[in-house]
Amino acid sequence: MKKILVLIMCLLAMPIAFADYYADVVVDVDSAGFVSIEGDTDYPGLLVDNSEIYTSKDKGVWTLRIEKEEVFSDFFVVINLPSGSSLNYAKTSGTFRIESEKGLSVKSFGSNEPLSVVIQYQITKKGGNYVWYVIGGLFVIGIVVYYFMKKRSKKEEVFEDEKDEETEEKKIKEEEKEEKKEAQKKIKRELDEDRIKAIKPTLNENQIKILDALLEKKGEASQTAIKYMTEIPKSSLSRNVELMAQKNIILKFYNGTSNFIKIHPSLYKEVEE
């Protein structure tokens, strides 16, 4: 009988024994999907810096998913979403609330249950309408200027023709001089290895793989080729390419039916042969 009572007490104590994790953390998500988690916790590996293991993107919709099956005795989690974000869906364990006073954030708190945070959001680019107003205004101003310039040019047509001929002759002579100078001096462009070495420590593992693959392809390749060379997932590749383009490490361009990337011209140097 005593053994049965001891067994029952052990079974009742098991949930308490296992509910020994706690978390009081802040989750910061940037516009490229990279996540940093800081704060106080005893859960192994929960704190990360500039990681993309918790985010994914599908057709413009980002998903943040942090799910831990172990029981947390107490948790308080603040998720700060990127500037310009709009919330599509939010579900967390415990209780949560949404705040938007200083940017969009979700706060979740609870006790004696697993930690689970699933948030879907989109990032809206600001200032789009303003740009179109500026373009429209410049277009109208351009039409007005063109009208007055054309009217004026009719009065000075003869004079302008003579002046244009003289200008063209001078231009031709200047071009001939420049061509002679260029013929005397041969300059080639090559990658600046010192700059590339200096940049690599600032990149994460996937970004270094992309840069090395471009170097292997002599500075330019399709995004599909880079994917197969590095074995980086498509969504992660796109995020890292966008981030590297923002840092002026690579350039993106479209060639026919494929997206291409190449090493940024600022990483080249001119060398006389």
Image (spheres, rainbow, N blue to C red):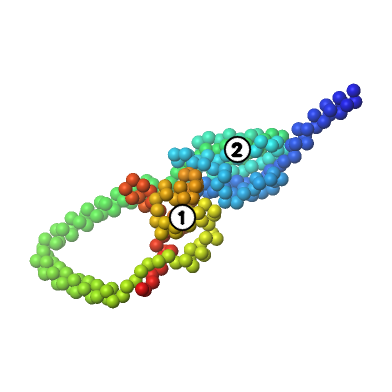
Q: Which residue is mark 2?
A: 117
Q: CB atoms at circles 1 and 2 under 8 Å apart?
A: no
Q: Quadrant of the C terminus?
A: bottom left
Q: Which residue is located at x 14 percent, y 58 percent?
A: 151
Place of residue 209 in the rendered image (x, y in percent of width and height, measured from the top left): 50, 54
- Residue lying furthest top: 1
Instruction: Please state the horizontal and vertical placement of residue 136, each as a whole percent of the image.
Output: 29, 49
Q: Of all residues shown, which one is farthest toward the right?
A: 2
Circle 2 sits in a helix, a strand or a loop, which is it?
A: strand
Q: Which mark is residue 213?
A: 1
Q: Nearer the observer, disc 1 or disc 2?
A: 1
Q: Could you tell me if residue 82 is visible in this image?
A: no
Q: CA distance from mark 1 to mark 2?
A: 36 Å
Residue 72 figure quarter? top right
Q: Amino acid at mark 2?
A: Val
Q: Quick one: label 1, few (<14), some, or many (20+) residues within 10 Å?
A: many
Task: Please indicate whether residue 161 sits to the left or right of residue 87 in the image.
Answer: left
- Identify the image quadrant of residue 68: top right
For the point 55% across and 47% down, the residue is 52
Give the side of residue 16 with respect to residue 151, left or right: right
Horizontal side of residue 205 vs 191, given as left or right: right
Left or right: residue 89 versus residue 2 is left
User: Residue 51: horizontal and vertical position, in percent?
Assistant: 57, 49
Q: How many marks are shown on the rendered structure? A: 2
Using the image as rendered, state which of residue 158 and residue 6 is in the foreground. 6
Residue drawn at (43%, 46%) of the image: 125
Q: Residue at x 66, y 46 (%)?
A: 45
Residue 53 is tagged as: none
Residue 250 spot, x, y in % from top left: 43, 57
Q: Amino acid at mark 1?
A: Ala
